[in-house]
Image (cartoon, rainbow, N blue to C red):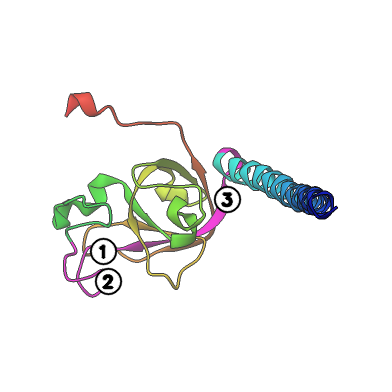
């Protein structure tokens, strides 16, 4: 009789444990499916920015210590520049929210097409990062002495251009 009760008790505990585990896993599966769905939506929004672009404020900066840091000739991605030739590089700094590491759609080395800036429209390469206080903004790298400018509603679009590293 004792062995039968023990066996019945073990079977009951096993069935209860299985039922509880199944319910727990079903709930976790629902949460996982919700996260997968949310992730797909976010990817679609991010793809929209990559193909359709986004509106940004465009300003300029010079590679001088009071506008950058103590090494104005070294950009955030490690690129070394000649300060007096900065305007020739066609490099930009982007606000942190635009960088992939902070949830954006750009990474160092990406090329963007800039429109809506009159004389500054064209293709630029992302090489630097702006101060964290700026959002939805890009700075065009310019040589010292270039008069300051600002465009409130410019548009950037990520391009498919790549640098062929075999030619360097």
Residue marked by disc 3: 54
Label 1 to label 2, Cα distance in Å? Answer: 7 Å
Question: Is there CB contact under 8 Å for labels 2 and 3?
Answer: no
N-terminal of the pair, mark 3 or mark 1, is 3
Q: Which mark is residue 166?
A: none
- What is the quadrant of residue 130 in the picture? bottom left
Instruction: Identify the residue shown where x is 44% and y is 61%.
Output: 96
Q: Name the front one of labels 3 and 1.
A: 3
Q: Could you say whether the residue bearing mark 3 is in a helix, strand or loop?
A: strand
Q: Is residue 137 visible?
A: no
N-terminal of the pair, mark 2 or mark 3, is 3
Quarter in which the C terminus is drawn: top left
Q: Is residue 54 magenta?
A: yes
| 83 relative position to 95: left or right | left
Question: Is there CB contact under 8 Å for labels 1 and 2?
Answer: yes
Residue marked by disc 1: 62
N-terminal of the pair, mark 1 or mark 2, is 1
From the top left corner, tell me how far across and down residue 1 is, in percent.
Answer: 85, 52
Label 2 to label 3, Cα distance in Å? Answer: 25 Å
Instruction: Identify the residue shown where x is 53% and y is 57%.
Output: 56
CA neighbours of label 2 inside 10 A, class few (<14), some (14 to 19), many (20+): few
Instruction: Identify the residue shown where x is 73% and y is 45%.
Output: 33
Q: Which residues are magenta?
A: 51-72
Q: Which mark is residue 67?
A: 2
Q: Is residue 59 magenta?
A: yes
Label 3 to label 1, Cα distance in Å? Answer: 24 Å
CA neighbours of label 1 inside 10 A, class few (<14), some (14 to 19), many (20+): many
Q: Could you say whether the residue bearing mark 2 is in a helix, strand or loop?
A: loop
From the top left corner, tell me how far across and down residue 53 is, in percent.
Answer: 57, 45
Instruction: Identify the residue shown where x is 74% and y is 51%.
Output: 21
- Find the residue positioned furthest to the top: 166
Q: Nearer the viewer, residue 62 or 3?
A: 3
């Amino acid at each position: 009789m004792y062995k039968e009760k023990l066996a019945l008790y073990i079977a009951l505990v096993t069935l209860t444990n299985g039922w509880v585990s199944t319910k727990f896993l079903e709930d976790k599966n629902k949460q996982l499916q919700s996260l997968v769905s949310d992730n797909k939506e976010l990817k679609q929004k991010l793809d929209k920015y990559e193909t359709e672009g986004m509106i940004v404020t465009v300003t300029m900066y010079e590679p001088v210590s009071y506008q950058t840091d103590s090494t104005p000739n070294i950009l955030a991605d490690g690129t070394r520049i000649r300060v007096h030739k900065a305007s020739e590089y066609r490099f930009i700094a982007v606000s942190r929210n635009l960088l992939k590491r902070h949830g954006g759609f750009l990474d160092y080395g990406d090329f963007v097409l800039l429109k809506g800036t009159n004389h500054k429209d064209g293709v630029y390469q992302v090489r630097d990062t702006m101060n964290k206080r700026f959002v939805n903004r890009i700075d065009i790298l310019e040589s010292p002495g270039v008069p300051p400018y600002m465009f409130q509603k410019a548009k950037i679009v990520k391009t498919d251009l790549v640098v062929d590293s075999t030619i360097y």
